[in-house]
Amino acid sequence: MSFSAILGAWIAAFLTLGIFSYLYRDNPFYKIAEHVFVGISAAYVAAISFWTQIYPNLFGRLFPKDGPLAFTGLEFDFNHEFNILYLFPMLLGIMMLLSVFQQFNWMARWGIAYTVAIAAGLKAFGYLNSNVLNQVKASSVDIFSGSLPFFSLGGDSVFNNIVLLVGTLSALMYFYFSKEQTGNFGRFTRLGIYFLMVSFGASFGFAVMGRISLLVGRFNDLIEYSSADYNYATLGVLVFIIVTLGFWSFQNPERKEN
Amino acid sequence: MKFLEDIILKLGAVDRRVIFILIGLAVLIPLLTPISLPVRETPTTVKFYDGIEDIPKNSKVLVSFDYGPSTRPEIHPMNVGVLRHMLRNGHQIYISCLWPDGIYMALDALEEITDEVNPDNVSTFDIKEYEDYILLGYRPGAEAVIKGLASDLRKVYTVDVNGNFIDDIEMMDGIKNLNDFAYIYSGSAGYPGTFEWVKYGGDPTGVPMSSGTTSVQVNEVIPYVQTGQLIGLLAGMPGAAEYEKLINVPGIAIQGMAAQSFAHIVIVIFIVFGNLAFFIKQRRDRKY
């Protein structure tokens, strides 16, 4: 095992157990892991965005090899041709960065406005087509289709079609607030709440399942790092954190909340 | 009865740290002493498997790695399985990433299935870059990137992850946009991921696509399977385990299912006791 792999295992074990230590209470190990995570994430995304997007796709188009701006001494060869339009996104980007200076604060709004407008335009079409039209189309089913069995657990059936229709209508009616939800209408919207509750329950179940899966993943890594190949990284870090945390807790007793 | 109620009340008021330790143990013990539990395929996983089987042999397929280390335990086993399945069927794989860490996830997955690095000659392949696969790399921009790929891939990717010009790579001949792929797959952990691929990739182009997602997203993504916008779906780690079973290469997802199941049992027990304690307390408060 190389030195870098062993060092990586010790750092990974420390950061993982540092984050887990929050389950006991907020403490310096958790703070270190949290700050390192945030700092590295931000720096990593900034660096990779620059080298994979700005450098080849922006500079590559504004300062191509043998382009009209070659006299500046800047030349980036990415098989692009010169395109003056790319000055516009570069300017907007610079204007957004200028928000750190108070007197140029207003400039950032132009870049943000452009980004918001583009995103809104892009998303409007996507949502309308994929989430509204296609879903409405799929909900329009032939309820009593003769070719379908009356009941099926997994596939299409008359019973499932009725559930789909009643569930969709009652859940939608629950959000209709122009009529007081009393009487038969109230009972129907109440049914809608039950459908929504089932959906929220399923979401909660899936969320729990996801979190446990991530825990399984971290434990798998910690088990791997506890082997002799990694100089017992997990065990070493675990003992260090427990002893230090015990000492720290002794000096900083937890305040009882009333 | 009162004695039993008192015990339930005590269990309902147990310190949260005790629950953490019990869940930790419920996960750790099955991982240390592996227990084999049966894995049964769900219809969405079977559809997913059949969808890949139905791709004509030796096709060009796009695989997107849209996740990072934080969700690796859920998505990585799926993506490794998908690569194995596609290579077994002779497809050429084009890898893109909407997440910056996706590059390293893809490199890890490729390493795992490469004979040269990890030869077991059963679940690994003698694959060569620029012949069997190409790693296009990461581009920031989320849905804008997908829209770009749908119209002109070469405007988004001028160089691949190694810095080689796309135009000079033979494997890229004939690839102009998403319509030139026979299939799209996204291993997605959130934004940008499955939703964006469906809206700006699969739906507008009509190229068949499927996805593997984290458990948290399943409830929102599954309507796409029912409408046919997604051919199939791998739902979290259980979905990955089912898929590993279908492709007959048991991996880390199947190993994790026992731990997953035991942890769920502990959580369900605490939910039951927590609710019972709540109702008992409510009844007693009403009485006095």
Image: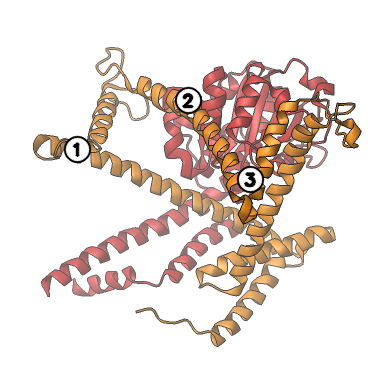
| Crowd rating for badge 1 (residues with CA inside 10 Å; few <14, some 14–19, many 20+) | many
**Residue wearing tag 1:** A189
Q: Nearer the viewer, mark 3 or mark 1?
A: 3
**Residue wearing tag 3:** A96
Q: Amino acid at mark 3?
A: Met
Counting residues from the start of the chain, the first of labels 2 and 3 encountered is 3
Q: Position of residue B246 (x, y in %)?
A: 56, 32
Residue at 59 percent across and 68 percent down: it is: A30
Q: How far is disc 3 from disc 1 in space, using C-alphas?
A: 47 Å
The subunit letter for the residue under badge 3 reads A
Query: Is A110 displayed left or right of B129 in the figure?
Result: left
Q: Quadrant of the C terminus of chain B?
A: bottom left
Assign a secondary structure to mark 2. Answer: helix
The chain drawn orange is chain what? A
Q: Which residue occupies the foreground of this view, A45 or A74?
A: A74
Assign a secondary structure to mark 1. Answer: helix
Give the quarter of the image for residue B241.
top right
Q: Amino acid at mark 1?
A: Thr
Query: Is B207 displayed left or right of B216 in the figure?
Result: right
